[in-house]
Image: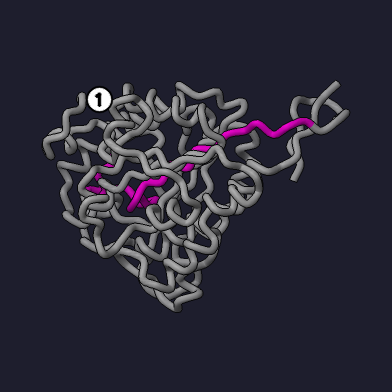
Amino acid sequence: MIIARGDCLATGIMENDSRVLLFFIDGLGIGTRGPHNPLDGLTDTAPLALFQDEISQLPFAGVLAPTDARLGIEGRPQSASGQTTILTGVNAPKIIGAHKQGFPNQALLDILREHSIFLQLKNKGIDSITFANTYTKRFFGRRPRWISATTAAVEAAGVQFKVVEDLRAGRAVYHDFTNEMLIERGEIVDLRTPEEAGGVLASIVRSHRFTLYEYFITDKIGHAQDYDAGRRVLPMLARFIRAVLGNLDLANTNVILTSDHGNIEDLSVRNHTLNPVPTIIWGRNAEAIASRIGTLADITPAIVGTLTAKVTACA
């Protein structure tokens, strides 16, 4: 893959200095309008307010690639297998023969440890990579028996985890980007507005070639069928995303937002949905990147290709 800079004839190859943020949102599908969907009727939720059979104007010239989360396997898409697929480029449900909910089992952990996007990038000489989320001391002191796909993907490449001290120093963001949950747990941290948190995440992105950020409160709201929480949280999440975009130079940075399955867009049921999920691409060559993404298995290859592509320079 070759990326040309400018409208001119290429005269040489220059270093690829592009950056990518993979913004993962758990449980966000492209739903239909109606009282089952907390996004319907909200006026401040761009780019999250996406509805089937409607063309949405995305802020910052975003490009939508509706993405298949079912991956050719019967049943409802699930978190463990979907996230494994996103973070490796391997069709995990096809490999194990089913969608796997919750946390990865041994078969999925094996896929993550061999094909993690972090490991793929390191093997191609891209060492400036990070997982922006904060971990608390509780995780390290009493490590849970089951770990998330993101945790396994980070560990596979030996990437350092961020802790609360990193958050205080402006080097990390919690999954609740306002820090309210951390404060409730007794951590001494400041509350952040969505705009403040977006500025912090953008500064992390500017310092790394590849950054992953994970947000999963949406999936919890979907399972709880909590309409009021959805109407409260979704506008804040949209503000956070717009703040990230507004603090980045999208001429040399791509932001790729995606999800593992639908959920919050249909609160009439507690289960995941069969809806496609949104993959939205912002930044340089967004249309070309979007054209490469049809299923969750296409996301890691698109990112690796973007960060390792040869860049042609103009005279």
- Our reading of the magenta stretch's main secondary structure is loop
Q: What element carries label 1?
A: loop
Task: Report the residue that reaches farthest toward the bottom.
Answer: 97
Q: Is residue 55 visible?
A: no
Please tell me which residue is depicted at 51% across the width and 28% down the height of the picture: 207
Q: Classify 170 as above or below 224.
A: above
Please tell me which residue is depicted at 51% across the width and 27% down the height of the picture: 206
Task: Report the residue that reaches farthest toward the front.
Answer: 141
Q: Tell whether position 226 is magenta.
A: no
Q: Classify 197 as above or below 233.
A: above
Residue closer to the observer: 289 or 115: 115
Q: Classify 260 as above or below 303.
A: below
Please tell me which residue is depicted at 25% across the width and 56% down the height of the picture: 143
Can you tell which quarter of the image residue 198 is in? top left
What is the x, y in percent for residue 154? 44, 51
What is the x, y in percent for residue 253? 57, 31
Compared across the picture, whether 131 is left or right of 139 comes to right
Can you tell which quarter of the image residue 9 is in? top right
Q: Tell whether position 15 is magenta.
A: yes
Q: Give the range drawn in magenta.
A: 14-43
Check the picture and name the quadrant holding the C terminus.
top right
What is the x, y in percent for residue 173? 33, 34
What is the x, y in percent for residue 243? 39, 25
**Residue receiving disc 1:** 192
Compared across the picture, whether 310 is left or right of 196 comes to right
Can you tell which quarter of the image residue 133 is in? top left
Residue closer to the observer: 78 or 134: 134
Residue closer to the observer: 262 or 20: 20
Please tell me which residue is depicted at 34% across the width and 30% down the height of the picture: 240
Q: What's the amino acid at mark 1?
A: Arg
Q: Number of labelled discs?
A: 1
Way the structure is coloured? one colour
